Image (cartoon, helix red, strand yellow):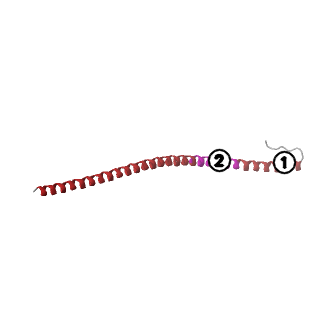
Amino acid sequence: MYAWIQTQLSEAQRAIEDEQRAKDEATEQVSAAERRVASVMEELEEIRSELEASDRARKAADSKLNDANEQISELNSTMNSLSNVKRKLENDIAILQVQLQLCRLRGSNCSLPN
């Protein structure tokens, strides 16, 4: 009976050692998984930060684009207005030149419009 108890005790001790090894391995696997999770979380936070910076840069670029488009529109409007004034002035000059030639042909007794 003593041998049987010794065998049972030995088997129980081996089972305990096996369970301890399995527990140690599981603990190491949990630790490794926790380290990976922490690393992934750090990377995720870094990516979020970069995304926010990218969004801010995009919004700033959009704002600059809108400002530039507004300026282009204002400049086009000014250019169109100046073109109209130029055409009117060229037309007025042409009329005055014709009137001046008519006055020269008629003599010095000619009045030009103001």
Q: Residue flagged by tag 2: what amino acid is it? A: Leu
Q: Is residue 48 magenta?
A: no
- In contact (CB < 8 Å): disc 2 and disc 1: no
Q: In this picture, which residue range is highlighted in magenta?
A: 66-84
Q: Earlier in the sequence, mark 2 or mark 1?
A: 2
Secondary element type, mark 1? helix
Residue at the right extreme, as displayed: 107
65 or 94: nearer the viewer: 65
Residue at the (86%, 47%) spot, across then down: 103
At which x and y percent is residue 61? 55, 48
Rendered image: mark on residue 50: none
* CA neighbours of label 2 inside 10 A, class few (<14), some (14 to 19), many (20+): few
Disc 1 target residue: 100
At which x and y percent is residue 97? 82, 49
Residue at the top extreme, as displayed: 114
Residue at the (71%, 47%) spot, across then down: 85
Residue depth check, mark 2 versus mark 1: number of the one nearer the observer: 2
Residue at the (42%, 50%) spot, across then down: 44
**Along the horizontal axis of the image, is 108 left or right of 16?**
right
Give how far apart the Cα atoms at labels 2 and 1 are.
36 Å
At which x and y percent is residue 29? 33, 53
Where residue 108 sits, quadrant-wise, is top right
Secondary element type, mark 2? helix
Residue at the front extreme, as displayed: 2
> In the rendered view of the protein, which quadrant contains the C terminus?
top right
Q: Is residue 81 magenta?
A: yes
**Along the horizontal axis of the image, is 8 left or right of 92?**
left
Q: Residue flagged by tag 1: what amino acid is it? A: Leu
Residue at the (46%, 46%) spot, across then down: 49
Rendered image: mark on residue 75: 2
**Along the horizontal axis of the image, is 38 left or right of 72?**
left
**Along the horizontal axis of the image, is 48 left or right of 71?**
left
